[in-house]
Amino acid sequence: PGEESGSGITVTPVQIAAAFQVVACNGNYYPPVVVEGLQGADGKAEPLVSAGSSPGRPALAGSTVAALQEMLEANVLYGTGQQAQIRQGVAGLGGIVISGQVRDDAKDHSWFGGYAPVAAPRFVGVIFLEDVPDRADAAATLFAAIMGECLGR
């Protein structure tokens, strides 16, 4: 009693991305891969190329996946995730994280995570912004910009 909703639950952005990945991959879990970027021997950036992977491990039932996909897409189209919209379609969710810091100027954090494009997901991502308590709008806007670049706008 008296606790904020979700207090005491600790997850990392990579764990959140893994959860979105299961939904994007129709209920199959693949271990997350964190990629900052690729650089050739000449120092120039190289495009990301899929290295392929082994079959995923079933993690969610089809009916559960379908419901989650529908809810995450609806959140971006009609709910609090509208700032994440791009032409190819995004499914996702964002929110506020209580900082937990005990100081007068402590601010909460905002985040947004999801996948794109909706029809055939290729990318999963999570944006976490410290000290930006903008109801996840700032995180959703950045998510849209990054996904738009990944998908060639």
Image (cartoon, helix red, strand yellow):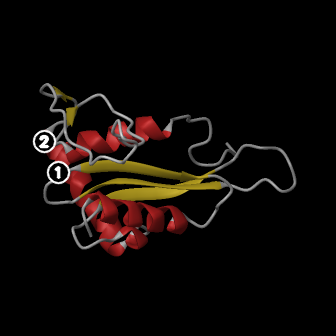
Task: Identify the residue at image location x=50%, y=61%.
Answer: 139
Q: Amino acid at mark 2?
A: Gly
Q: Quadrant of the C terminus?
A: bottom left
77 or 150, nearer to the observer: 150
The tag on residue 62 is: 2
- Helix, strand or loop for disc 2: helix
Q: Amino acid at mark 1?
A: Ala
Task: Identify the residue at image location x=22%, y=47%.
Answer: 24
Which quadrant of the view contains residue 82?
bottom left
- Helix, strand or loop for disc 1: helix
4 or 90, nearer to the observer: 90
Expressed as whole percent of the image width and height from the top left, the position of residue 87 reads 24, 73
Expressed as whole percent of the image width and height from the top left, the position of residue 55 reads 12, 27
Tell me: residue 9, above or below residue 124. Answer: above
- Residue situated furthest right in the rendering: 104
The tag on residue 23 is: none
Tell me: residue 143, above or below residue 38. Answer: below
Task: Identify the residue at image location x=28%, y=67%.
Answer: 74
Which quadrant of the view contains residue 116?
bottom left
Expressed as whole percent of the image width and height from the top left, the position of residue 96 reads 57, 56
Q: Locate residue 135 relative to residue 13 in the image: left or right.
A: right
- Label 2, residues with CA under 10 Å away: few <14, some 14-19, many ≥20: some
Q: Quadrant of the N terminus?
A: top right
Whether pointer 1 and pointer 2 mark residues with C-beta atoms closer than 8 Å, the reply is yes
Task: Identify the residue at image location x=40%, y=66%.
Answer: 145
- Label 1, residues with CA under 10 Å away: few <14, some 14-19, many ≥20: some
User: To which residue does mark 1 refer?
Assistant: 66
